[in-house]
Image: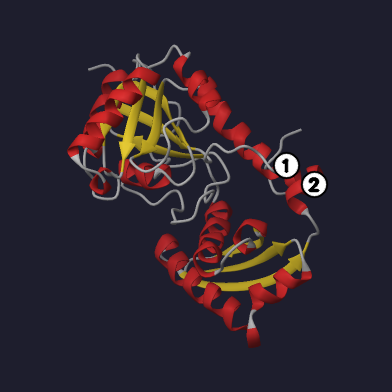
């Protein structure tokens, strides 16, 4: 068998299960996945390797109508995934409205690459409603293959992997076979800390927060990490820290535990909270935080 390799990009609206699906396909926890919309902010690659196959999966932010510049950058990440895919996985679910963001769906319909429409969370539906959804998606995207799935329960995940393997072209690998992502270690530190903020704070706080790794010092037995948590308002800083620092301490404790599992080393995690006024609408800060290119 000749070697096959390809880029398989995962797109869709917020909170439909894109990150959960990619983690299941890879068998690794690459993307943070929470119950909150817009958890994913970057385009994150995870690389699936066997002797004869290399699939470069790409998780993307949920498609949104932008309200500020950060969301504009997130939408650009999603749209860029339409341009360089060998196979596109369009993830929807049984809950969301089928006509949400029809302009993006129209772009998907005009692609010349194989498209798999994955209807996720089927455990929340019934056979009659699911059949109607499959029919409706078939009308919207007539060239696509429609596959009902449950990423959380692993239903049809192996079948997606099988279909993707069949659809990607014969090609040498793009990356070394022992490489499993394109992101550096610092990226996963900031994502894990940000995930805990998403889980433990309400309303606008998680969305006004960015996490930056200031230092990452590793030796044989331990990693010493310093991170800065940026917010947009002084009032948000107070909420992040909490009374007597208890809220921030909870974030640090839970993040440290998960980082120790992720890196399989002792972690020393130091955090600071700073205010960067309206950073989500600042071209300068978005570039500093890696959301915009030159």
Residue 189 rendering spot, x and y as whole percentages: 55, 59
Position of residue 293 relative to residue 106, above or below, is below
Q: Secondary structure at mark 2?
A: loop
Residue at left offset 44%, top offset 11%? 112
| Furthest-left residue in this view | 127
Residue nearest the observer in this picture, 226 or 66:
66
The scheme the figure's colours follow is secondary structure
Q: Secondary structure at mark 1?
A: helix
Identify whether 44 is placed above or below 265. Answer: above
Residue at mark 2: 282
Residue 134 in percent (x, y) is at 28, 27
Where residue 234 appears, as percent x and y from the top left, is 78, 70
Badge 2 crowding class, 10 Å Cα cut-off, few under 14, some 14 to 19, many 20 or more, is some
Q: Which residue is mark 1?
A: 69
- Please name the residue shown 59% across and 34% down the image: 77
Q: Are marks 2 and 1 in contact (CB under 8 Å)?
A: yes
Q: Is the residue marked by circle 1 packed among few (<14), some (14-19), or many (20+) residues within 10 Å? A: some
């Amino acid at each position: 068998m000749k070697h096959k390799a390809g880029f398989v990009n995962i797109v869709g609206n917020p909170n439909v299960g894109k990150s959960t699906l990619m983690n299941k396909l890879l068998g690794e926890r690459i993307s943070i996945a929470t119950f909150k919309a817009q958890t994913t902010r970057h385009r994150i690659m995870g690389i699936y390797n066997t002797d004869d196959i290399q699939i470069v999966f790409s998780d993307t932010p949920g498609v949104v109508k932008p309200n500020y510049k950060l969301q504009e950058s997130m939408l650009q990440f999603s749209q860029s995934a339409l341009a360089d895919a060998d196979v596109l996985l369009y993830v929807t679910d049984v809950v969301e409205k089928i006509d949400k963001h029809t302009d993006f769906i129209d772009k998907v319909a005009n692609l010349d690459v194989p498209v798999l429409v994955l209807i996720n969370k089927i455990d929340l539906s019934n056979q009659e409603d699911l059949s109607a959804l499959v029919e409706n998606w078939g009308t919207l995207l007539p060239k696509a293959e429609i596959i009902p799935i449950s990423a959380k329960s692993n239903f049809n995940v192996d079948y997606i992997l099988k279909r993707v393997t069949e659809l990607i072209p014969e090609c040498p690998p793009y990356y070394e076979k022992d490489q499993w992502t394109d992101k550096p270690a610092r990226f996963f530190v900031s994502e894990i800390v940000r995930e805990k903020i998403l889980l433990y704070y309400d309303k606008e706080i998680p969305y006004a927060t960015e996490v930056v790794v200031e230092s990452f010092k590793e030796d044989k037995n331990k990693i010493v990490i310093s991170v800065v948590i940026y917010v947009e308002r002084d009032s948000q800083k107070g909420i992040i820290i909490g009374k007597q620092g208890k809220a921030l301490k909870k974030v640090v404790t839970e993040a440290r535990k998960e980082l120790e599992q992720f890196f399989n080393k002792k972690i020393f995690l130091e955090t600071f909270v700073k205010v960067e006024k309206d950073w989500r609408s600042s071209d300068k800060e978005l570039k500093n935080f890696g959301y915009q290119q030159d």
